[in-house]
Image: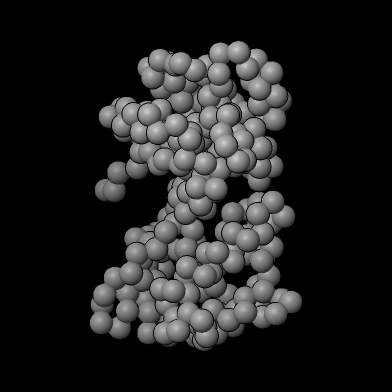
Amino acid sequence: MTETPSPQILIVDDARDIREPLGQYLTKQGLRTRLAANAAEARVALEEAAIALVILDVMMPGEDGLSLCRWLVARGGPPVILLTAMADETDRIVGLELGADDYVVKPFNPRELLARVRAVLRRAPQPETEVPGRIRAFAGWQHDPGAHKLLDAAGRETPLTTGESRLLTVFLDNPRTVLSRARLLDLTQGRDAKPYDRAIDNTISRLRRKIEADPRSPELLVTEWGGGYLLAADVSETGA
């Protein structure tokens, strides 16, 4: 029986001497971690991986933590624990008003932060476990959604991120059907497409690099101008 993976925690902090030791500590405590030095890296991580909780520094260059927190809450993202400076009571209040779940004041005790992480995870709704689906074939490829991978005609494996595999599953469920960006976001994430419309375009671009002979002239994942995207291939079921 496959073990359920431990929750994955995203640590967003521009200070490397905080980000990396904290990641190592949480990993030793049995959690999976992913690190981001800024809001842009955090958005990529949130698109590519199933993040259970975000530890987010408020004071960062460029887009600050409060802005990213607002974006996360607006799109129904994972729970947030803010890291704030001792004197920044206003930031703590604003963060909680925005929808952050908790905060920890710097400098902090890693054991206290771990306790707060576990408490927030206990309170947070648990995501639905993905059930391995059908293995299906299209255009010389086989898609295994349970393992998040593609097999070519020679049996060579191409790994997929969770987001890529989920999006491809939607196209395989709806072959030769034009799907709008909003519809694709709704089917893959169950959220309103408005906050981050480019997410679908970015994921499709990555998928094209993996399945198209020439990603610059795609023949499988076709753009329908003004409409959305279409999988231009027949789909057949090969197994479970």
Residue 82 lies, in percent from the top left, at: 56, 26
Q: How is the rendered protein coloured?
A: one colour
Q: At x 26% / y 77%, what residue is drawn?
A: 155
Residue 69 lies, in percent from the top left, at: 62, 36
Quadrant of the image containing the C terminus: bottom left
Q: At x 60% / y 41%, what residue is drawn?
A: 62
Q: Is residue 138 visible?
A: yes
In the image: residue 123, left or right of residue 160: right
Query: Tag count in the figure?
Result: 0
Q: Is residue 228 above or below residue 122?
A: below
Q: At x 37% / y 17%, what residue is drawn?
A: 111
Give the quarter of the image for residue 135. Answer: bottom left
- 121 or 53, nearer to the observer: 53
Q: Is residue 234 above or below residue 124?
A: below
Q: Is residue 186 above or below residue 98?
A: below
- 57 or 14, nearer to the observer: 14
Give the quarter of the image for residue 239. Answer: bottom left
In the image: residue 115, left or right of residue 154: right
Q: Is residue 151 above or below residue 108?
A: below
Q: Is residue 169 visible?
A: no
Give the quarter of the image for residue 112. Answer: top left
Residue 33 lies, in percent from the top left, at: 38, 38
Residue 185 lies, in percent from the top left, at: 63, 60
Q: At x 62% / y 28%, what residue is drawn?
A: 100
